[in-house]
Amino acid sequence: MKALRHGKRWAWTLAGLLTAVLTACRHEPAPQPQGRWVAPAEEDLTAVHLQLKEQEKQEIEAFVARRGQALQQSGTGLYYDIYERCPAGAAITRGDAVDLAYTLTSLNGTLLASSETDGLRRWVVGAETGEPGLTELLLLMRRGEKAFAIVPSHLAYGLSGDGDRIPPHATLLYDIEVKGVYVKRK
């Protein structure tokens, strides 16, 4: 008797789900907005992008709160702390090349790259390719300084990652030291 009741419940549940699916497939198209027409796929992607960005922001804020370290936040969403200053070091400007000692991890603590295993990283500040968040941080620094930064995915490798070490939609944690600054000749 108990098995029969359980079987009936399962059948009603299945019937309800099937009805919901079939009903959902028969919706009427949304009315077209006045003015510029935007394809529904573009609207959907924009909504998903905004949702992912908000979720990432909440994850970063929770990480910062757990870490308990005072970090500055830029208007773009970069969190950073230049924890060792060197006022006598060469200032960094766009077009300069810098050598970086670094550790790069994901927000969950996975080591992605390090100068200990890969050697110093040469970076041209403000180059067309690369991470705008790292460029933003370097423009605040001088040779000899050390910094910690949280770079949101939109300031790093975005939704696609780098196809190698950096996964899609990855928030990056940098711990860097500027070892050398090579000033671009004017």
Image (spheres, helix red, strand yellow):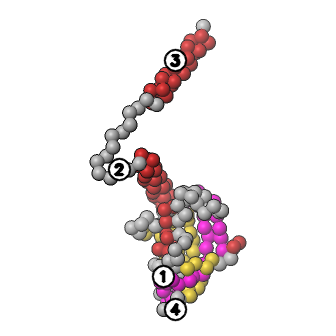
Which residue is the site of mark 2? 37
Marks 3 and 4, the one that precedes in the sequence: 3
| Left or right of 49 in this view: 1 | right
Q: What percent of the width, then of the height, locates residue 25?
A: 46, 31
Residue 73, by quadrant, is bottom left
- Alpha carbons under labels 1 and 4: distance apart: 11 Å
Query: Tag 2, which secondary structure?
Result: loop
- What SS does tag 3 mark? helix
Disc number lying in front (2 or 1): 2
Please tell me which residue is depicted at 51% across the width and 25% down the height of the picture: 17
> Disc 1 residue type?
Arg
Residue type (three-letter) at the residue carrying disc 3: Trp
Point 57% across, 82% down: residue: 98
* Residue 86 drawn above or below residue 15: below
The 10 Å Cα crowd at callout 4, few under 14, some 14 to 19, many 20 or more, is few
Q: What's the CA distance linking mark 3 and mark 4?
A: 76 Å
Q: Quadrant of residue 175?
A: bottom right
Viewer-nearest residue: 155 or 66 = 155
The residues colored magenta run 88-115
Q: Which residue is mark 4?
A: 185
Contact check, label 3 and label 4, Cβ < 8 Å: no
- Which quadrant of the rendered structure holds the N terminus? top right
Residue at 53 percent across and 65 percent down: it is 156
Residue at the disc numbered 3: 12
Quickly name the residue at label 1.
94
Above or below residue 87? Residue 168 is: above
Q: CA distance from mark 3 to mark 2?
A: 42 Å
Q: Nearer the viewer, residue 73 or 75?
A: 75
